Amino acid sequence: MKPIRLPEPPASPRAMGGVPDIFEGGVHGVIRRAVVIGNGFPASENQSIGLVQALGLADKHTLYRVTRPRGGVNEWLHWLPVSFHKSLYYIISQICGILLRRSRKLGTLPTENGGNAGLASILEANVKSIVRMARETFEKDGPLLVVASGRDTISITSSIKRLASDNVFVVQIQHPRSRLDRFDLVITPKHDYYPLTPQGKEQVPRFLHKWITPHEPPDKHVVLTVGSLHQVDFAALRAAAITWHEEFAPLPKPLLVVNIGGSTRYCGYGADLIKQLTASLHNVLASCGSVRISFSRRTPEKHSKIVVKELGMDPKVHIWNGEEPNPHMGHLAWADVFVITADSVSMLSEACSTGKPVYVIGAERCTWKFADFHKTLRERGLTRPFTGLEDMSESWSYPPLNDTAVAATRVNEALAERGWKIKA
């Protein structure tokens, strides 16, 4: 199969050369470090870390995390603002006392950020401490770049911007729905503006229009992407190819990688789609050298059991058992072709960044803005529907999706307008 030539990563500010710091805004205009505000969800945190990495600050950032109480009644309270949720949980736990805690009807506040993530070194996102750090270190270390993603981080980053606007540059990933002027830059997929399109307005009763966000088209400090940001770039794929060489290099070609997610609010499907997927995979096995299948955290057990039952005994097929090390990066580096369920924007964005063939199953079941997302992917030639009639030995390609690098360029441009720059 014809190899895909990936684009080189964008040059870091250091590689671009230029005049000494003292002549470009002095030391106070040079960003040397970043703070990432996470929410405990890998898909969201991956976007922030991917952007910081693309900006040349991969080894110069600190990860903070916004946490919520989890388990029991807390699962019904996630729609509340984080601070109010925590306060309400504290009151409920005090009223209910030891009895409810022993019966485990209420979740406990995580002792570490991210709960079960096992990252004890990650700090709790505290506005006062981050603002204090940004102010006190400004003279010595210059401005602080703050990058966050996800609804739970909005109150934190907007407060940091309000209290330390002269010392920080705040980038919010994913649309905050309102008051975008609370941030220096907002990075969000184009399909988040689907409610403003004629097709989007037709799907919502007129009396509900004022409740559907966003209300206004993007302005100059909004960066639109096709999909989600991530950490998959030329350097990461090259490193993964080396790391996983021993396992994947001997496999017969073409190597088909299948990523299976789980039903979501706007991309709903059940066991019928999984059975359709396994039947279609049976049809294309003859044109595959090897097949690697992975499930996500959202994949229902009943769906994974169907796949294992139908394909697990085929000698060409290997199904990842979920144990470490995770072969995901190896799959991206060594795959010749992908089949991916339609529910995951992040999995599709990563696969489309390789320039390799990406087939999607279940896109016709997606609604609202996610249907628009899949329409964009197809129109740009990034994906094709998976029918089971494909010859997997026939390759096709496209300019790799490069959202993270594009976003990083826009961040550098916005910093330059303020007289600041990043020194990686």
Image (cartoon, grey):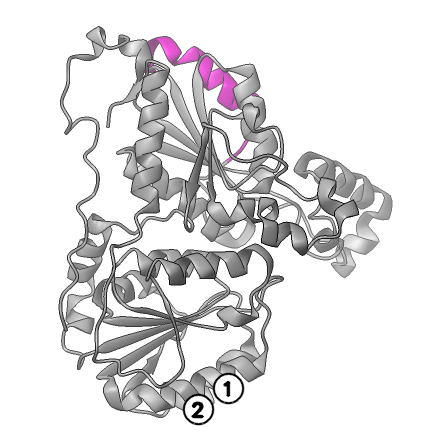
Quick check: 406 left or right of 208? left
Q: Secondary structure at mark 2?
A: helix
Mark 1 lies on residue: 275
Q: Does 253 appear above or below 211?
A: below
Q: Does 140 appear above or below 1?
A: above
- Toward which corner of the image does residue 424 lie, by quadrant? top left
* Three-letter code for the amino acid on which mark 2 is drawn: Glu
* Three-letter code for the amino acid on which mark 1 is drawn: Lys
Report how far apart the C-alphas of labels 2 and 1 lie in the structure.
9 Å
Mark 2 lies on residue: 310
Image location of residue 289, percent across then percent down: 21, 84
Image location of residue 150, percent across then percent down: 54, 42
Question: Of circles 2 and 1, which is in front?
Answer: 1
Magenta segment range? 124-141
- Within 10 Å of disc 1 (Cα), the crowding (few <14, some 14-19, many 20+) is some
Quadrant where the N terminus sits is: bottom left
